Amino acid sequence: MSLPSRPHALRCAFTLAVVALAGCGGSDEPKATQVAAKVNGDEITVHQINQAMQRLASVPEAQAKQAQKQILDRLVDQQLLVQQAVEKKLDRDPRVVQAIEAARRQILAQAYVEQVVGTAQKATDETVKEFYAQHPELFQERRVYRFAQMAVAAPADRHDAIRAKLEELDKQSDKAKILPQLAEWLKSENLQFRVTQATQGAEQLPIEVLPKYHQMKLGDLMFAPGAQGVVISQLTAAQTQPMSEQQAQPFIEQYLQNRERAKLSDEEMKRLRSAAKIEYVGDFAKLEGQQPSAPGSDQPAGQAPAAAQPAAPEQPAAAGEKADEDAIAKGLKGLK
């Protein structure tokens, strides 16, 4: 077989080049691009916008384009600031470098946790039915509570004195005078406090102490010590608002799945710790094996666990607002 002549080979190469160009850009239609904007040459992509959209609550389809534009504008502003930071060499500032590394570590750790808990099984109809039956205070006998709450900023060594004064006042017949009289005593002791009103459904209270709240009568008190002080709650009203099993099912499913995810996460953390060689150094070696005291651990036997972490008087926390992975609010979020 003879090789093609040089002119013939050049014609073939030219023909292939024309075909390739026609396939790449011969059409007048605009090419699809993943670039949404360029800021001084730096690209902002559609993927960045989509990622930000995923972090938003459900956006109606009619408003999606507007939301995307708003996100893009924020990303443009962010990129302008990033460019200025780099120009000023802030990306080399030790504090910035440490913050970036801390964020990287957190993202990687969270990604691994999500992979581990991603195997959590969905609750079955049987487990949902069983959970519903085991917690009448959440469903069949669900109540909405109204509390008068007093958040007191006090060190741990004053908690017993506050509790003792509260018990003394609780012995009187007129329950309406307890908090006003306690307020006068707190003033005499130079302890700052703030009184607020709070309305909460059963699902907003910690599940481990909900039965105690369920048994409360008008005027009854709940004493909740914490790291920054105490929260004293007095029941002023309660209304029964039951929830059917059908209404409760999606929330129970979510709660049970969250509980399973937390279990998987805890088990994996224990496994990793047991398999790792962990050495505490310097002053921290002295703390090895010591368990930190949990807020509210100064409660006597039989006392209900803290329903809240009391805030400073300027921003008191309502009972049930603490971040507790086992609180039923995780599964029944949004119900009133």
Image (cartoon, rainbow, N blue to C red):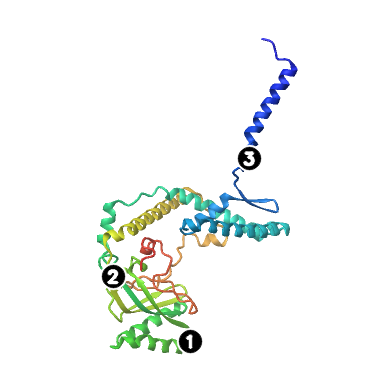
In which quadrant of the rendered image does the C terminus lie? bottom left
User: What's the distance in space between the residues labelled 3 and 1, CA to CA?
Assistant: 80 Å
Q: Amino acid type of disc 1?
A: Asn
Q: Is residue 114 left or right of residue 105?
A: left
Sequence-wise, the earlier of marks 3 and 1 is 3
Give the quarter of the image for residue 233: bottom left
**Residue located 45% across and 63% down the image:** 291
Find residue 241 and name its label. 2
- Residues at marks 1 and 2, CA–CA distance in whole angstroms: 41 Å
Q: In which quarter of the image is the N terminus?
A: top right
Cα distance, mark 2 to mark 3?
64 Å
Mark 2 touching mark 3, by CB under 8 A?
no
Q: Which of marks 1 and 2 is in front?
A: 2
Indicate the amino acid at tag 3: Asp
Q: Is any atom of residue 209 visible in this view?
A: no
Kind of residue indicated by mark 2: Gln
